[in-house]
Image: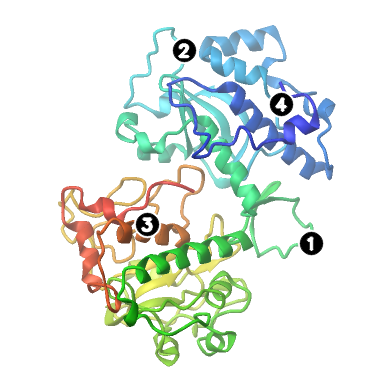
Amino acid sequence: MNTTPHQILDIDDPLVSDENPAREDGTLDYERCARLHNYLAAYGWMARHGKDTPNLDALASNRRFLRTAEDERALRERLDSSLISFLDSIYDPQVEFFYWVCGLDMESCDDSFPLEDNELEDGKARFIVIYDTDSGLGPHCLGVIYDQQLHRASLTMTIENTFCVEPVDEHDDLWFPLETILTNWIYMIDLGKVVPGLPNDGDPPTSKSQLGLWSWLPYCDAQIDNTIATMEHYSAAVESRMPSDSLLLISAPLFTDADLDAASVPQDCFIRSLLTRLKTPRFRFIAPGLEVPHDKEAFVRRQKFTSIPHEKDYIPAVLLFAAPDRTVNVNLEIWSLFSTAHENFTMNEGDPVPTGLYSEPVCRAHYDTEEAGFRLLLPFALRPDPRDDQGARMSDGRLVESGSFAQLFQHGYFHPFGGESRSQRLERLFQRWTELIEGGVWTVGPEGVEGDIDKFRDADNGNDAWIDYCIAPYW
């Protein structure tokens, strides 16, 4: 075990990365996982007690799993030897371990996976809850589930979520080495997306979602920087494929604050910060049928949600890239999504709404919200025939709901590193779109990306066509 504060907090080496991938040989890398665990335990302990370095005596004082010989015998009956070695190498967190989970559990949850063969040769349980879900999130909690047969893990927050990850052999992309999950949590802390701090510590109570020690922010500064970099990389990929004499002579940011004031875009929000710093693309169409808003007056006219009254910490949807002259009528799905930011939503079923790429409407105090997210609102329904099992899919591998207008490119019901409801991030969308441009799935002409918005119907074309219109599971 790492025994000095310096060793615990020196975390760069064990983090999973492209250059330092997770173990894939079907065993638990318990030493690496222990280092990642101990970093999170120390980080939370320091935040709780206002310390600059962990007090190792305090961290090590409560070893509840291996406190007695009887405890150890009970654990050995249900745990693989590598998990025992992991427990021997870690500190009990003593505080809430991370935003979604409280602390160590190590109980069997085989009963929650009835579709699996849970009889291991040595009689041990197959599925173990390593970290249990924070009970503040509701009933039927599970947590980080560890498969002792395949030595992979998944954050299955509730019993109801198990249907997303079983049968296990059909959901391989939603089970990860344990070090991958722990690395992603540390990345969220480094990014500034998840932050520690006790309630009533001076922050406005409605500006974040707090669970015990940890808070989930609707967006952070690094997300603005990363999204801008990704979108400008995408624009460069498009521009490099255009005839040089067709590029527009523009070098200014996409919008000024005055432009956004005219469109009633709220102050101090993710989308305003993004749009006032983003370089204007030097072409007309940023995706099939979606227009770059070079005409600022048209941009203002198309905003249907920013003018509806909303409170300070409610951020309405902003139409970023519209499909000109293509609308869709408000239905229950659209009403549910876009009314989120309004206490009195004034649009009615059947009212026309411009289609295109919108920023995500949010209430910042809601659990697991994502202000850096998006909704691609289409003028046609996906999977119009509910019997069709070959249509568009979401990141968790599930089919989009039959008749949906806004689920393309979204997470789905399952978030593999935590969460249940937030939208997909704009940064991830433009990473995927870059792959479509570079892979030749989308073509580029003199005005930018070719085709109209009906190109997105390709996601429903059967066979494996949906793969191009699906974002790989991530946080």
The residue identified by callout 2 is: 124
Q: Indicate how the structure is coloured in the image.
A: rainbow
The disc placed on residue 202 is 1
The disc placed on residue 406 is none
Q: Secondary structure at mark 2?
A: loop
* Residue type at numbered disc 3: Arg
The residue identified by callout 3 is: 432
Residue 16 position within the rendered picture, expressed as x and y whole percent measured from the top left: 54, 36
Tag nearer the camera, 3 or 4: 3
The disc placed on residue 91 is 4
Residue 336 position within the rendered picture, expressed as x and y whole percent measured from the top left: 40, 67
Q: Which circle's residue, 4 or 1, is located before the other in the chain?
A: 4
Near-viewer residue (200 or 36): 36
Mark 1 is surrounded, within 10 Å at the Cα level, by few (under 14), some (14 to 19) or many (20 or more) other residues, namely few
State how far apart marks 3 and 2 are (Cα): 42 Å
Image quarter of residue 82: top right
**457 over 139 or under it: above or below:** below
Q: Secondary structure at mark 3?
A: helix
Q: Which circle's residue, 1 or 2, is located before the other in the chain?
A: 2
Tag nearer the camera, 3 or 2: 3
The reply, left or right, for residue 214 in relation to residue 146 is: right
- Image quarter of the N terminus: top right
The reply, left or right, for residue 434 in relation to residue 446 is: right
Q: Which circle's residue, 4 or 2, is located before the other in the chain?
A: 4
Residue 230 position within the rendered picture, expressed as x and y whole percent measured from the top left: 47, 62
Q: Which circle's residue, 3 or 1, is located before the other in the chain?
A: 1
State how far apart marks 4 and 2 are (Cα): 24 Å
* Residue type at numbered disc 2: Lys
* Residue type at numbered disc 4: Tyr
